[in-house]
Image (tube, rainbow, N blue to C red):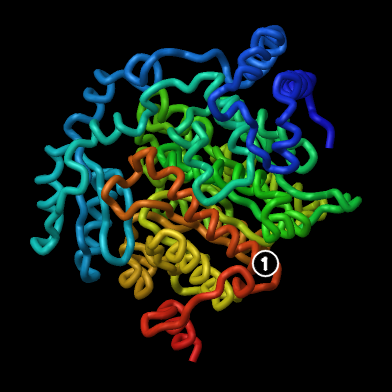
Amino acid sequence: MQLSTARHLFALFAVLAFTPALSIVGAAGIQPSWHDAPSHRDRSSEHVFPFLRWLRDSAVEVFLGRPSPRTRAKGVGPSDEDLQSRYRHDLVVRFNVTNSEEEDALSRAAAQMLLDVWAFNSEYVDIRLHKDDVSPLLTLLPASLQPSVLIPDVAAAVRATYPSRAATVSDFDRSMVASSKMRTSVDGVGNIFFSDYQPLSVITSWLRLLEAMFPSFTEISNIGKSYEGREILAFRVGDRSESEKAPRKTILVTGGLHGREWISTSTVNYLLWSVVTAYGKEPMITKLLQHFDIVFIPVLNPDGFEYTWQADRLWRKSRQQTKRRFCRGLDLDHAFGYEWEGTKHQSDPCSESYGGDQPFQAIEASELAKWAKNETENGVKFIGFLDLHSYSQQILFPYTYTCMVDPPNRENLEELAVGLAKAIRLSSGETYTVSSACEGAVARAYSASESLPRIEAGGGSAIDWFYHELHAKYSYQVKLRDTGSYGFLLPSEQIVPAGEEMLNALKYFGDYLLGNNGIEKYSFKKNDDEDDEWRDLRRRRR
């Protein structure tokens, strides 16, 4: 594969010129000596090669921009005054639902008051609202539904998610090289890129620099442009060294469909970096990349993501103009064409789950679908789709639009999903539940009558479209950490732990696709508490 631009060549030459160890690092995983305290010889080289050091720094600045000494309050994200103005009276509450009457009342109230529903499942519904709206909401609900406060100060929680300082060129340069050594489960901790959430400009530059560092088996492509004209970048990883030119089976991993779900974008980036740096070092990852391509799309909604950094940290939708002037944005996960039901459940543009007035009205969803269809027309077979979201620690499989219809290979979907959850639990102790994506907070009522409202409409989802239209046999939506303590405002300290959880899940996923069904990579000790998930699955099969 050839580098696509002269800028790539310039950056690669500059980095290699100043750091000869980089080529060794990429091939053999050796840590460069200057990662430690510089020796006398190291310090002398700084004086002998000042031009090369300048060239190196200049090349990286092309991608990452000049370092800024400003703190978060002055330069990274909105000012403290703006945050207080927007969020100081907001809180997040939880309603524990136990019956269909409560589910029905809560779904109607959410629609009537245009509430910002953060999470919903068969046990609880989390809602962000102004503190003065709590009493009016309770008048619409049964007396049995009483809220508990999860986040009493949304403004403070929002402020804590922005980086404490702007990353510098030397931070990224030194971290990128040092972290390409033989990685272990904690290597990401030392990578400054994953110590904070990163804005779109930094992510884009980081992806291009990563491609320049590993040109033989990585490639960036632009799958289309957003409503506001931003590129939607896809990062393909695959080993074509054995003269294999034909399209191959492909796993697609996406994040950032909803702007505020920063952990989904960071986790896709973490998976990308982990897979790239594990190639040639970890046998299973190497074998997987020899048989499959993996395409990572970290920011599918770049306009919404950028808006969360510049104006509203909790913005969910795209930034596309709608028929109602003051209600911008479409929910990308309700904009895909399969079983789209916009006019039935999400006709109000002010709704957080508004998917448009017709299928694929959302530019970003349309661009992804056109790209994916074009890939299949050129011989690509999407075998797996992992759509990362937050939060609530769930692994969901099709269908989303209804509980009345089971996917043809439900047993396989459920079996693999249970395996993914187990891989996560064994790596971190965190529990991820497994269910059909239709089983939201009103699953019991909805399965009995299609006329009852839902907390959030299910039609037009990405996992249903890829599963049904492109025949991606293993299609999942994964809702990452946590279960409500922070919600969408997960602290940056959890970026690496969340990434490691999904990396273990991705390894299991790859091992399963390679035909090992998780057996070769993961062997478990049997005991009295062993494998509750598998026993439940076997019992259902009987």
Work out which residue is located at the far front of the displayed protein and give it. Answer: 40
Against 68, residue 119 (above or below) is below
Total marks placed: 1
Against 520, residue 385 (above or below) is above
Q: Nearer the viewer, residue 196 or 360?
A: 196
Q: Is 126 situated left or right of 20 in this image?
A: left
- What secondary structure is marked by label 1? helix
Residues packed near mark 1 inside 10 Å, few (<14), some (14 to 19) or many (20 plus): some
Three-letter amino acid code at the position of disc 1: Leu
Quadrant in the picture for residue 466 = bottom right
Question: x, y (%) of residue 76?
Answer: 40, 21
Question: x, y (%) of residue 447?
Answer: 38, 73
Q: Is 198 situated left or right of 251 in this image?
A: left
Quadrant in the picture for residue 20 = top right
Residue 278 visible, this orientation: yes
Q: Residue at x 30, y 48 (%)?
A: 117
Q: Is 349 situated left or right of 61 in this image?
A: left
Q: Residue at x 27, y 36 (%)?
A: 157
Quadrant in the picture for residue 22 = top right
Where does label 1 land, which residue?
513
Q: Residue at x 64, y 69 (%)?
A: 512
Q: Is 201 situated left or right of 195 in this image?
A: right
Q: Nearer the viewer, residue 229 or 20?
A: 20
Question: x, y (%) of residue 255?
Answer: 53, 45
